Amino acid sequence: IHSRENTKIIIVGGGGTMGSSTALHLLRSGYTPSNITVLDVYPIPSAQSAGHDLNKIMGIALRNAPDLQLSLEALDMWRNDPLFKPFFHQVGMIDCSSSKEGIQGLERKYQALIDTGIGLEKTNFLLNGAEIAARVPPFTEEQTKEWKGLYCGEGGWLAAAKAINAIGEFLRSQGVNFGLGRAGTFKRPLFAADGTTCTGVETADGTKYYGDKVVLAAGAWSPTLVDLDDQCVSKAWVYAHIQLTPEEVSEYKDIPVVYDGEYGFFFEPNENGVIKVCDEFPGFSRFKQHQPYGASSPKLISVPRSHAKHPTDTYPDASEVTIRKAIARFIPQFKDKELFNRAMCWCTDTADANLLICEHPQWKNFILATGDSGHSFKLLPNIGNHVVELIEGSLSDELAYEWRWRPGGDALKSRRGAPAKDLADMPGWKHDAQL
Ligand code: FSA
């Protein structure tokens, strides 16, 4: 008989967002620490996880049916859970636009927020240009006169890598097992004599880990490890940083996160005066012939190239142009500053941008927790609770349906403006270290 105390769980990619959250919720649900094994190439917070980042946006998502519930659960934990609270900077978030379609989108989103019927009109407002400038003091009214905004008072930013690190420290303090490096690098699932019941994982160094359930939470690496039938296409997004002087920092401190779907977004400076800037675009794929476990022959898969493993890589020349364009729009006084720590981070899109959190249809006890679609870091506090529900058979029908195994559709485009361009066609990013 399996009880929580004696069920053994292996989490592949346990150093990232979904995996660390799953390990945390297993502990909080009464699983025995020594029965939980976290595998990752890098120690938690895994340096190749998209969550290994200075900051990520917090906001109320309404893109898909379960988004409201999941965002509100997460909001409550970012605000109140002692483990997560220190990492939430609730400075507000302004979705901005100056284009006709963009402004219509903001108005629709505002209406959808109101229509939730939970009183969001108290903290979410449509803003005109002058009102945007009033909430972001360094903006001038001249700069924002053509803009409209949607202010989200629940929003702000999350100190992403620090939050995963806090989970990691808790896991270590409780005595969870870790397999790292080659001993944490997934090679293949192990099966019982029936050939379909998963009993564990073999890693690159040949170690065999046995357990009752295996959770594959390897983010953008998931579709390279096991055949997901083209349900996930991994893509890179880019970011760069600028350094402010102490005087500049004081001007920008505590400003809301500013986002524009046609330009990008930026955050207030961190404790070292560093601002992260991103452009907004449909992502970059990196297709090559590759054979994930379970595929009968090599096929075209978009394979991430880890910045952790290739620290001298930057991003395409084209991204330098679009990042500069975002800087010119948001913070023109910094347009001549040097850009540093320019890098790509990898997410994996599904066709409908819903997560893929389900048992593998052929492999019993092999559970997928992936398909972040670029919008899931905010769910770090609560997503693992739903993975535990799936493990225990108590996941709600609604979530189980949205997150089901569902081949078909176009994950290369997903719900974005255009399909991803391939990095093979984008010069400038690849820089192997000169030895
Ligand atoms: O609150 C959010 O969902 C922020 S999405 C941030 C972002 O960088 C996107 O802008 C990008 O298009 C991709 O989805 C990765 O995440």
Image (spheres, grey):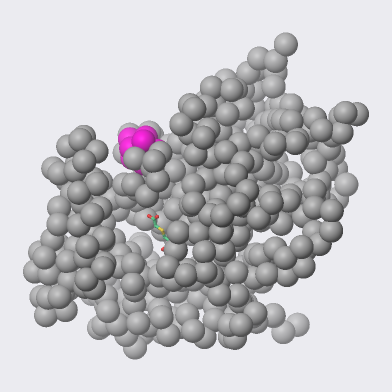
249 in magenta = no
Answer whether residue 24 is visible to the viewer in this image: no
Q: Residue at x 26, y 67 (%)?
A: 102
Could you tell me how many numbered marks the image carries?
Answer: 0
Q: Which residues are magenta?
A: 69-77
The answer, for residue 246, to whether it is visible in the render is yes
Magenta stretch: helix, strand or loop mostly = helix
Image quadrant occupied by the C terminus = bottom right
The quadrant in which residue 311 appears is bottom right
Task: Judge whether residue 71 is colored magenta.
Answer: yes
In the rendered view, does 359 fall on the left or right side of 296? left
Picture quadrant of residue 197: top right
- The residue lying at 22 percent from left, 71 percent from top is 100
**Depicted 22 relative to depicted 329: above or below:** above
Residue in view at x 37 percent, y 49 percent: 63
Which quadrant contains ligand 1? bottom left
Left or right of 198, for residue 245: left
Q: Nearer the viewer, residue 262 or 347?
A: 262
Looking at the picture, how far across and down is residue 107, in whole percent? 20, 57
Q: Residue furthest bottom?
A: 336
Q: Residue at x 54, y 81 (%)?
A: 316
Q: Position of residue 120 (x, y in %)?
A: 19, 41
Residue 180: x, y in percent? 73, 49
Judged left or right of residue 49, residue 54 is left
Name, please, the residue furthest toward the front: 408
Between residues 156 and 89, which one lies in front from this camera angle?
156
Q: Is residue 193 above or below residue 112?
A: above
Residue extending farthest right: 193
For the N terminus, the image quarter is top right
What is the x, y in percent for residue 434?
72, 84
Query: Dividing the picture into quarters, in which one does residue 213 lie?
Result: top right
